[in-house]
């Protein structure tokens, strides 16, 4: 039997965590800034229990929620959104199709190979497709504290270096801005960035 991941163990109470409640700000911000319409199919990478996927679902045609944690995705399926599909797979195992956009909230720092991840996103966007990724600005490792147990691969990201990686993956119109701030249980505030980019239309 395989050992359950941190996320499988945390799934049932994930949405009630004070941090999850604060991260609702991220969905609200993305709904404001992204050009969404009902013809689109978006991918939510590291969707977890679908905080972002379910918010997007009201504004687009279909959302695919990708995650390696079966338990997180089960909590999402139990919410009963007809136009949200779940895909229990590792992002590096190959995606079944291309999308009009890819979003993600707080999943990037769990993937060691950031350049490879951005290349996967680029390869699975339609021409003109959009990427919008939210994660921690570089921090000192205090956000999670028990980093190894939680599968943390990066203590946030340095904005300039991440922008360069997105450009190297082929994205254009790349922007990175701090969009919200969250207060952790240690009482400290941590800024989150939104990295946006587009796959060229031709
Ligand atoms: C911190 S949680 C964020 C969940 C959700 N986006 C939210 O904000 O509540 C990170 C999620 O990314 C998933 N994840 C990590 N690495 C992954 C990978 N290589 N492929 C797919 N999902 C992954 C984890 O299973 C976990 O559910």
Image: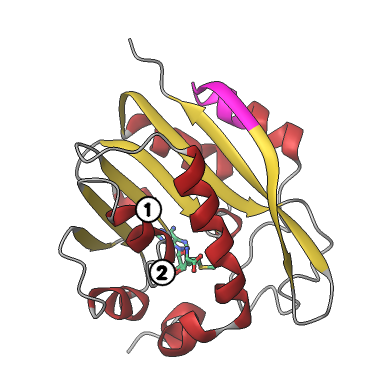
Q: Is residue 59 magenta?
A: no
Q: Nearer the viewer, residue 81 or 173?
A: 81
Q: Quadrant of the N terminus?
A: bottom left
Q: Image point 75% across, 32% down: which residue?
A: 160
x and y percentages locating residue 78 in the rendered image? 24, 80
Q: Residue furthest front?
A: 32
Q: Up-down: is 23 above or below 180? A: below
The color scheme shown is secondary structure
Q: Is residue 169 magenta?
A: yes
Q: For mark 1, what is the residue?
A: 44
Q: Image point 26% across, 54% down: which residue?
A: 64
Secondary structure of residue under mark 2: loop
Q: Image point 35% across, 59% down: which residue?
A: 53
Q: Magenta residues? A: 165-175
Q: Up-down: is 24 above or below 37? A: below
Mark 1 surroundings: few (<14), some (14-19) or many (≥20) residues within 10 A? many
Q: Is residue 134 left or right of residue 144?
A: left
Q: For mark 2, what is the residue?
A: 48
Under 8 Å from ligand 1: the CB of mark 2? yes
Q: Is residue 12 left or right of residue 171?
A: left
Q: Quadrant of the C terminus?
A: top left
Under 8 Å from ligand 1: the CB of mark 1? yes
């Amino acid at each position: 039997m395989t050992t359950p991941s941190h996320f499988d163990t945390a799934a049932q109470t994930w949405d009630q965590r004070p941090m999850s409640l604060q991260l609702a700000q991220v969905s609200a911000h993305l709904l404001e800034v992204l050009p969404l319409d009902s013809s689109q199919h978006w991918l939510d990478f590291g969707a977890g229990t679908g905080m972002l996927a379910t918010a997007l679902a009201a504004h687009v045609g279909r959302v695919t929620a990708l995650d390696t944690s079966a338990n997180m995705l089960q909590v999402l399926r139990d919410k009963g959104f007809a136009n949200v599909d779940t895909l229990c797979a590792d992002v590096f195992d190959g995606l079944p199709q291309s999308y009009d956009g890819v979003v993600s909230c707080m999943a990037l720092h769990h993937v060691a190979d950031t350049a490879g991840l951005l290349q996967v996103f680029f390869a699975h966007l339609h021409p003109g497709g959009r990427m919008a990724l939210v994660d921690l600005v570089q921090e000192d490792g205090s956000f999670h504290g028990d980093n190894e147990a939680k599968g943390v691969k990066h203590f946030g990201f340095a904005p300039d270096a991440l922008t360069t990686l997105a450009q190297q993956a082929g994205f254009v119109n790349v922007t990175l801005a701090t969009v919200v701030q969250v207060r952790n249980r240690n009482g400290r505030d941590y800024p989150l960035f939104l990295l946006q980019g587009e796959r060229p239309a031709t």
